Image (cartoon, rainbow, N blue to C red):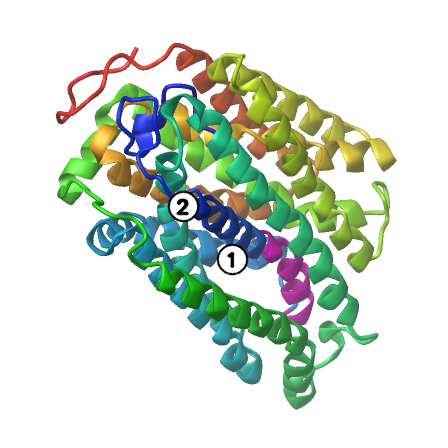
Amino acid sequence: MAMAPGAASAAGMGASDTPQVDAPGLNYFVFALFFIFGGITSLNDVIIPKLKELFTLNFFEASLVQFWFFIAYAVVGIPGARLVKRLGYMRGAVAGLVTMMAGCLMFIPASQTALFPMFLFAYFVLATGVVLVQIVANPLISLLGPERTTSSRLTFAQAFNSLGTTIFPYVGAILILGSLAGVSAAQLSGEELAAYRTAESQAIVNGYLGLAAALAVVAGVVWLFRDRLGGEKHEQTSLADGLALLKRPRFGYGAACIFLYVGAEVAIGSFIVSFLMQSHVLGLAEQDAGKLISLYWGGALVGRFIGSAVLRFVSPGLTLAAVAGGAITLIAIAANTSGTVAGYSLLAVGLMNAIMFPTIFSLACEKLGPRAADGSGIINVAIAGGAIIPPMYGALADATSLAFALVLPAACYAIIAGFGVFARKPAVGPDTSGVAGIFE
């Protein structure tokens, strides 16, 4: 994730322009973490249309997959930050990877029972592990290089997150959506319906079993290097101390924008398959529409490599405002046109999303110093916007249309543009006290 120049202290770095941790090999480990949790998160966009068909769900009901996945950020974010401070970064990463593996394995009983709530619970457990891994990854990458290049380095790391979000949906569309049978769940009932759901969900199970095996290997490797970081120091604070960060206008506004950004990005990704399948848009089959999700997330991949360079020279705040405005423009085009223009305009929003999370994160967290883990924990709680905005989008789409419902993510991006203008100036001075050092 990209951080603004000079914002490295948000992740616990010192003021010097030298690396705090001389362990270059750990960069590759962190890049791998970004790749894994990014890919698993984006795979939800492929699973949603599959479960929507299997359980004959409307848009709101289908969006509950994202609710149970992203609500874990609200439940686990702050306790997870405290756990990471107690265990240390490397052991915290192992705890997250093992939890992710357990979540993957829970898809076995979910498929066997053919119950939608069981799938939702599996997603919650899986997301709990993702939260722990993300709490580790965000500040850790900032420790592995000089402060002045943290913005560029964190954005470059986020590019690996985008690589995962690009690859996983494409492969998932082939393996999961391609397995849909000729019969529909809506045509079945009783034992036939239960048997159909069990058989068709096996593709989901197979995918997550493969992920569980990969996670077990990664967790084992990380455990071998659990003592690689020496002399970790984390300030032990209470929950009230962490929440006190929200009293700062800059951090509070930024946390709200993380909530809105993740909600908007996830809402569009969750229903983009259904949007592209509409006859007046691209009229694609489900698997073909699912493959195009990779373009949405691939845009973020390309944009993050570009952003890694641009943010070295351009004000992060103004850049954020510009790309948020670009997202609003593309959404307006998608909602008010048809055919290829509408479909690819919505897919292109991914390019505008590219630098939003890392830039908001860095602008909000400048000068947190030793309270980095608290700030990262609060930001991870704000990621729960992915649990709230998509169901709102789904309910609005059920009541109106997928195109009209795009007004909701557009409004989110408008508020984010305002934050870019608000936080265009660097934060003032390091903060080591409660609410002192209010930002401009």
Q: Is residue 424 above or below residue 231?
A: above
Q: Is residue 387 above or below residue 202?
A: above
Tell me if 159 is positioned left or right of 364 in this view: right
Q: Is residue 188 visible?
A: yes
Residue at image position (34%, 63%) is 95
Q: Which mark is residue 137?
A: 2
Q: Is residue 383 above or below residue 125?
A: above
Viewer-closest of 36 and 79: 36
Q: Is residue 101 above or below residue 197?
A: above
* Main secondary-structure element of the magenta-colored stretch: helix
Residue extent of the magenta highlight: 42-55
Viewer-closest of 169 and 91: 91
Tell me if 249 is positioned left or right of 175 in this view: left
Residue at image position (53%, 55%) is 36
Q: Position of residue 232 (x, y in %)?
A: 22, 45
Q: Position of residue 414 (x, y in %)?
A: 53, 22
Q: Position of residue 377 (x, y in %)?
A: 30, 43
Tell me if 102 is positioned left or right of 329 in this view: left
Q: Residue 136 colored magenta?
A: no
Q: Is residue 396 visible?
A: no
Q: Residue 48 colored magenta?
A: yes
Q: CA distance from mark 2 to mark 1?
A: 27 Å
Q: Which residue is mark 1?
A: 64
Q: Furthest residue to the bottom?
A: 191
Q: Secondary structure at mark 2?
A: helix
Residue at image position (72%, 37%) is 347
